Amino acid sequence: MAVKPKVDKSARKQAKAAKRAEGRQRYKQIWQAFKMQRKEDKALIPWMLGVFLLSVVVVFGIGLIFGIQWLLLPLGIAIGILAAFSVFGRRVQRSVYNKADGQPGAAGWALDNLRGQWRITQAVAGTTQLDAVHRVIGRPGVILVGEGASHRVKGLLAQEKKRTARLIGKMPIYDITIGNEDGQVPLKMLQRHLAKLPRNITPAQMDTVESRLAALTARSAAMPKGPMPQGAKMRSVQRATRRR
């Protein structure tokens, strides 16, 4: 008969204490983000309350049809809370992107907050006017993301595309310019735009491309790491909201 190893009680207590501290910090982040968003977004609470009540009413109504409305009520409340938090997260995200839009480094900041398996290299090309081209490696291939004045970024993208093609051959290369003009991708739509690109290469090919492109010398454009408006720590807020 196997003997179960003794569990160190002090270590278990420390783990529980660390978990509680992490939970308190998470709730604190959510509450701070909520207070800041509420001051700027007067429609936040009506939207959250409306979505919550609608979810409860819908689930309760389904329960009425089958005569189990009171059994489904707790489920409706839980769904309503999740829906309200989802609305909160989306409105915070929209607010942050609206503040960042048009600021130098905004595209680089947005790329750092991408969800998914993307490999980002900041400012592989740039100018002293804070125009920049960032390189993204993903399943679609290589994506070059430019930000700044369109007439300057166009040349930067073309030059970087040629340099990249010399090393990766016929591997797909996409170029994107961040902005609100025709043919450009709005900052807030960057994640969605990248997600819509076709999957052309495998993870193993991504490794190969990354190692080849590491040979390119990045020319620093003295870019800031990205605009961070008040309350713009989106990754922390979104992660905390999802865990809640």
Image (spheres, grey):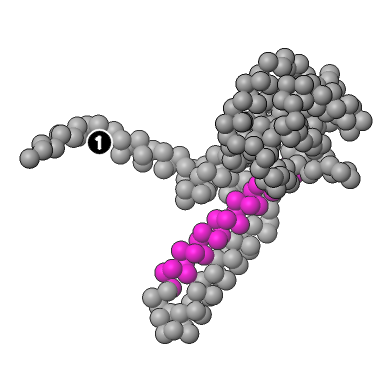
> Viewed as shown, does residue 177 lie left or right of 81?
right
Disc 1 residue type (three-letter): Arg
Q: Which residue is mark 1?
A: 12
Q: To which quarter of the image does residue 53 belong?
A: bottom right
Q: Is residue 95 magenta?
A: yes
Residue bounds of the magenta highlight = 73-99
Q: Can residue 203 be seen here?
A: yes
Q: Nearer the viewer, residue 132 or 33?
A: 132
> Viewed as shown, does residue 80 lie left or right of 5?
right
x and y percent of residue 110 in the render?
Answer: 68, 37
Q: Is residue 51 magenta?
A: no
Q: Main secondary structure of the magenta part?
A: helix
x and y percent of residue 90 in the render?
Answer: 63, 52
Q: Say which element carries label 1.
A: helix
x and y percent of residue 237 in the render?
Answer: 56, 43
Residue drawn 82% across and 24% down?
162
